[in-house]
Image: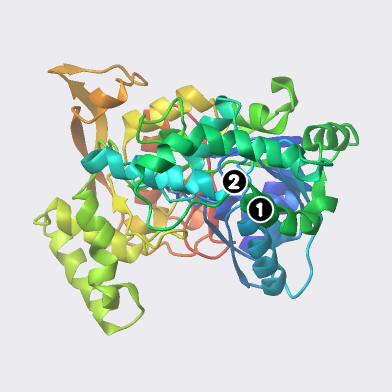
Amino acid sequence: MTKSTEKLYLDLDKVFEDTQTLVVVGANWGDEGKGKIIDLIMKNYDIVVRFSGGANAGHTVFTPDGTKVVSHLIPCGLAQNKLSVLGRGEFFDLKLFITELEDVKQTLGGNLPEIYIDHSAPLWTPWHGLLESWLESIRGSSRINTTGKAMGPLAGLHKLRVGPVVSDLYEEGDHLLNILKFLYTALMPLFEKMNLAEPVYTPEQVRDMLMKRAPLVKDRVVDTSFFLHKAKKEGKKILFEGAQAAGLDNRWGTYPYVSSGNSVAAGASVGSGLPMNAFNASLMVVKVLPTRVGAGPFPSEMWDRNLAESFPKETPELFEKGETRTNFLKDTLETINSGKASGELWAKYFQVLGDERGATTGRGRSVGYLDIPWIQYAIRINGPKWLSLTRFDMLSGIKSIPVVVGYKLNGKQLEPGEMPASVQLSKVEPIFEEWECFEEDIYGINDYEQLPEKAKNFLDKLQKAVDAPILLIGTGAERNAVVMKP
Ligand code: IMP
């Protein structure tokens, strides 16, 4: 371990020593690199808890010996061999969970830490999936472009008090069957409208599918809130791992182009069953160049959503290591620095440089400029003690970049933190300012003092603009490629 890495770890120990419970959330539209930050600070915690989302999430992290682990339902803190909890706020897909468990077990060489599932998490059925496909198809051109994991139907039907939860798997007699029959009957008129090619599974078939797998996870099903209360009392340190981000939060995101969970920091309380005063702090992860997949407003977007989504599929050679990619990045950077790059070219540069493709769907992520008003809003909703800025190294070699410093709506500039309704957000006019970047390559630096002056200036300027302290700054893919700002 290098001296600077040693120092980074010592500094992390100091900062998180007194933070027994920490919530980590995303500021933008997901894919901020929460996994990377959690991976780094997980060693300061004993337990990791997911409190929202479900199989729609995709985190890529690395074990201490460098093995890549991709998790969806399971908290990514598991890669650090920490006790993992799937809280009540998570939508539970039994089949996917078992597959994921097997995958993760293999990746980790057969060893799994303890993993618990809340007994009252909403439970997926194939009918939820049918409903999602149908809703997307009748939305037509205003489809949400979901990840296809039925988050909306799971959340919506649960609100309607229709559909099973995990504990229903373990009741005697026809308990589960009756719940499934009710769900099936409620959805039947819709199934009839759907013109499905295949017959719909009957309640008995769905029960059998679920019951076949239920014993495989039975030992893991507990009252996770009770478990966490006890763990906290015993002095265990708990990290709450957010999924998705503020822009995708069901209430505070860009509705209806949102997911269906509580992705904001308050979701940690609702989704884990710990009271609000149980949380010491939250850390909000901000992506220096925010990205978005699926539909919905994105005020600082550089290019076109659909074209950005298909870009990696159309030019796979740019997304693989090699001469083509290297030359593309070099030539595009030259154009950028000559001041002649279009939004499309900026977007393509960052998409290739950052390998911006979804871990769950493989779709290309559309890239946006750093967006100060959105960060101000996300700070207002999440109240983070610290910010973590990820992928800062992507600005290496760039002379200057446009940054969105305000929104104008109907000719009037909005106040810092003010956010119009989602439908209006697609109409805001971003106000740009040119921010100086840095010529030096900062990839992998993990000592603040080694950052070039211009990079430090950029961070100071950002910190001032959003009025919240930046604690950690990502400078590369490796776990230790993080700078702690004094
Ligand atoms: P759902 O969560 O599958 O319902 O999808 C709703 C919206 O959230 C879609 O635009 C998805 O692309 C987006 N989304 C859901 N999960 C993630 C994620 O983990 N990262 C980025 N976008 C996501």
Mark closer to the chain start, 2 or 1: 1
* Type of the residue with mark 1: Leu
Residue drawn at x 73%, y 59% is 212
Which residue lies at the image location 70% right of the left edge and 28% below the top edge? 279
Q: Is residue 301 left or right of residue 258?
A: left
267 left or right of 252?
Answer: right
Query: What residue is shown with label 2?
Result: 124
Query: In front: 227, or 374?
Result: 227
Q: Is residue 112 above or below residue 167?
A: below
**Cβ–Cβ below 8 Å for labels 2 and 1?**
yes
Q: Is residue 457 something one can see in this rendering?
A: no
Q: Nearer the viewer, residue 236 or 432?
A: 236
In the displayed structure, does residue 285 sit left or right of residue 301?
right
Q: Secondary structure at mark 2?
A: loop
Task: Kindly identify which numbered label has been placed on residue 3.
Answer: none
Q: Secondary structure at mark 1?
A: helix
* Quadrant that contains the C terminus: top right
Q: Looking at the rendered structure, which numbered label has been put on residue 94?
A: 1
Residue at the spot x=76%, y=37% of the render?
A: 175
* Residue 235 in view of the camera: yes
Per the model, the C-alpha gap separating discs 2 and 1 is 7 Å
Residue that lies at the very extreme toward the right in this rendered image: 234
- Residue 364 place in picture, x, y as percent: 32, 59
Measured from the top left, where is residue 11 in percent x and y? 68, 48
Three-letter code for the amino acid on which mark 2 is drawn? Trp
